[in-house]
Amino acid sequence: MSKSFPSPFRPIDSLKLTFNHIKIWYTAGMGFFTDAYDLLIIGYILATIKYAYCYAGIVMPGFTSYLVGPDKDFWNGLLASIALWAAILGQLIFGYLGDYWGRKKVYGVEAAILSIGAILSALSPDLIWFIIFRFILGLGIGGDYPISATIMSEYANVRDRGKLIALVFSNQALGSLAAAVVGIISALALPPCIAWRVMAGIGAIPAATVIYLRRKVPETPRYSLLANGNVEEAKKAASFLGGTIDAQQPVLAKRMSANEFLSKYGTLLIGTTIPWFILDIAFYGTGIYSSAVIAPVFGSPFPKSPTVLPLPVFQADLAYALFLGAVPYLVGFPGYFTAVALLDKLGRKTIQIQGFVMMAIIYLVVSSLMIVTYTSTGPKVSGFLIPAEAAFMLYALSFFFINFGPNTTTFVLPAEVYPVRFRTTGHGISAAAGKLGAGLTTYLFPTLLTAMGIKNLLIMLAVVSVIGALVTFFFVPETKNKSLEEASNEEITTTTITTDKQ
């Protein structure tokens, strides 16, 4: 921020937490509840369709032939990852539009796309259409990241900004829990051919509840004033929080070309993209493919060779299998809220570094405790040097430090460190880097798992976690207790122009 010009946002920066701060949190957070639900529920859907064929002899026309046929690896990988690839596109598109048109004009559109994609997914006539509808859903998921994060950051007071942005993101914890509950109950109570459609369709509900609220949220005071030079609109937005702004005449943020932005903030992009990319490799890899660690501990609830089970027995076994897959996420659940509680005290950078370091330590310790047998099909874990249950809980603890660490902070930081005219763009690029890591993980981990084995894979994840900590140390600034203008080095000046179209 220009040192010669005081921030016009001091009155709202110094506000105490208000009810409307919480209202904005709920409005933004329900999108992330849905994001987590929809990204995790696809694993339960895949398990339901495949296991129904293998262990209950149930064929679902238009689906089973793809997912258990000769090209099953391709179709399983595509269905599991298509929403992630679409999310990258959504993050980049909505990130750009949020800066070009403003947050208000696009807010709610991504929630509507998300809801429509979820409803259509539940009604899919075959796998091809299911993939298409999951792509639509993914666009909405991606669009939610930069817009919701930025709206929360630009409305938040300084003292609680990290907490509020992290609370938006922590709705993912609730969405993950909801996915597990809906998946398990659906598996137990419904025939498989209906259960998976219920799992897919319920994802539309949370996002649909906030479409109207999102359309009613005023343009943020910072975008109204610094991008549009509209004092009255900015004051109206500030009054939404019960505050005001110190600006009797229009002020504007300095305009920058894309080249100027990259010149000034290029190294910062390294700090917000690479850690997110690394984090999602670990988060999605150890989450989606946690069965490689779970199996040696708990075994499979299903018979060793495919057989036709009575439907009630199959449903109980399926529910148990889904529960085991959810255990690491349940262990990680408190991590989100530990980050919320400490983000404005310890700082974003400290929490991100300690999270990466603890992940590396846990991966190395668990891998060192594994007993590996080499077979004709590759290395397999046959046991552990300590009780298997203890080894598994240690492994699951990595999810606590993922969430009380980079999974939260990589979402918070890009909403703070970029200037107002590039804030959603910067966040969108950073989030897209994360989803690129997630998408690559979904495709490559099965191959790497076969070739390297889970032991060497965990060692690899430990190494990349250390890289994440180093990149954070050298390229990420601390934004705790700083105004957005100070954290982003915003340059603002007075102007005689009353409005400014970006």
Image: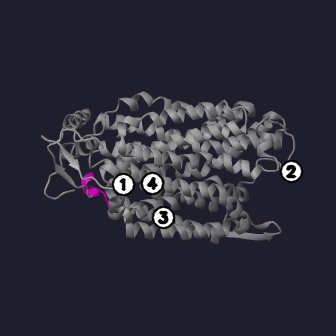
Q: Position of residue 476 (x, y in %)?
A: 37, 64
Q: Where is mark 4, residue-wise?
A: 429
- The mark that comes first in sequence, 4 or 1, is 1
Quadrant of the image occupied by residue 470: bottom left
Q: Is residue 405 magenta?
A: no
Q: As shown in the figure, which amino acid type bears the numbered disc 2?
A: Ser
Q: Where is mark 1, residue-wise?
A: 343
Mark 1 burial class by Cα count in 10 Å: few <14, some 14-19, many 20+: many
- At 43% from the left and 48% from the top, the residue drawn is 337
Left or right side of 411 for 127:
right
Q: As shown in the figure, which amino acid type bears the numbered disc 4?
A: Ile
The magenta segment: 478-488
Looking at this view, is 156 or 365 the one in front? 156
Q: Where is mark 3, residue-wise?
A: 356
Note whether residue 283 is visible: no
Q: Is residue 485 magenta?
A: yes
Q: Position of residue 66 (x, y in %)?
A: 77, 44
- The mark that comes first in sequence, 3 or 4, is 3
Marks 3 and 4 sit apart, C-alpha to C-alpha, by: 21 Å
Look at the numbered disc 4 and give the secondary structure of its residue: helix
- At 62% from the left and 41% from the top, the residue drawn is 41
Q: Where is mark 2, residue-wise?
A: 305
